[in-house]
Image: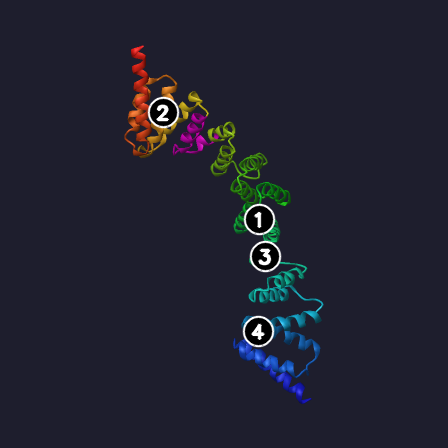
Amino acid sequence: AGSYERAVVLQTLGYLYSETEEYKLAAEQFEDALALNALPEDVTQNLRYNLAQLLISDGAYQKGIDLLTQWLNKESQANSSAYVLLATAYYQINQFTNAVEAIQRDNSPKENWYRLQLSAHMEMQQYNQAINVLEILIERFPINKTYWDQLAALYAQQDKRLTSLAVQMLAKRLNLGDKDTVLRLANMYRYLNIPYKSAQLLQKSMDDGVIERNFKNLESLADSWLAARENENATQVLARMQSMDSSGETDLKLARVFISMEQWDEAAGPLQQSLEKLPEAKRGQAWMLSGMVNYHLGNMQQSEQHLNRALAYTEVRNQASQWLRHLQNTRKDKEDA
């Protein structure tokens, strides 16, 4: 009877010390109470668990692991937090394989679980397993940008064909009726240099009403088409954006695309609009491009005027003076002929 009473006293003292956050003292009382081996099994089980928690939080990881393992072997209905505790302790002493195994023993893993598992795989440089965990995290928590960034970085280490396939497989499992998921996946495609897929996804999501046809989303769509060298598609999107943008930047961007396609007639209108909207300090490129377009359209006088306006801007001065020389040489050749 003496041992039982002493064990109860020690146990009670342990709980009191715990409440006042004197964890080292609490752990000592619990250890002494357990050593007496006099308490009923259910009480002993509780003590084992509480002591394991105290030991692990105090940095006595191996002692905590041993006790917690003992507790788990006798506990048929262990909850998630016990496995988290065990995995965390293993992780702290760099036993990453054991940490992963502890996590996988839980039947209803939580987000923190997967994050711990991910960290363990990364520590062991098991990148394929890390990718698997990240794909699960993204499926369950598609709004978290960090997981997408980590997955993109890991995919980028892999062979590009595998990368493309992996993203497509992931897309099939995701909820593409969720606008945040769509936008993250579109960014992922662009990050991995698969801009055509990004554009297709954005276009379809706009058509289906999943994402809005607002300026920001249209800009992403136009940039994806441009990166995919689908200039015709890009010009259609940019033309739609013109009325939404009073800065003149979209007009200039559209003009640049037409110029790259040598469609001088189409470039003239947006260039004129950009010159009307852009603030004076930002008109250099527009004047220079307008000079170039007018030259190709045969409007030599206007071309010269606009190129001369461009000379005032340092960023385009060299190009403008080259075009002016070219213009003067052309005129001279005509006069000589």
Q: Nearer the viewer, mark 3 or mark 2?
A: 3
**Which amino acid type is shown beneath numbered disc 3?**
His
Up-down: is 320 above or below 214?
A: above
Q: Which residue is mark 1?
A: 142
The answer to which of marks 4 and 2 sits earlier in the sequence is 4
Q: Which residue is mark 4?
A: 55
**Which amino acid type is shown beneath numbered disc 4?**
Leu
The quarter in which the C terminus is drawn is: top left
CA gap, disc 3 and disc 1: 21 Å
Magenta stretch: helix, strand or loop mostly: helix
Marking on residue 51 = none
Q: Which residue is mark 2?
A: 290
Q: Nearer the viewer, mark 4 or mark 1?
A: 4
Q: Are marks 2 and 1 in contact (CB under 8 Å)?
A: no
Is label 3 in a helix, a strand or a loop?
helix
Bounds of the magenta span?
240-260
Residue 248 is inside the magenta segment: yes
Q: Is residue 176 visible?
A: no
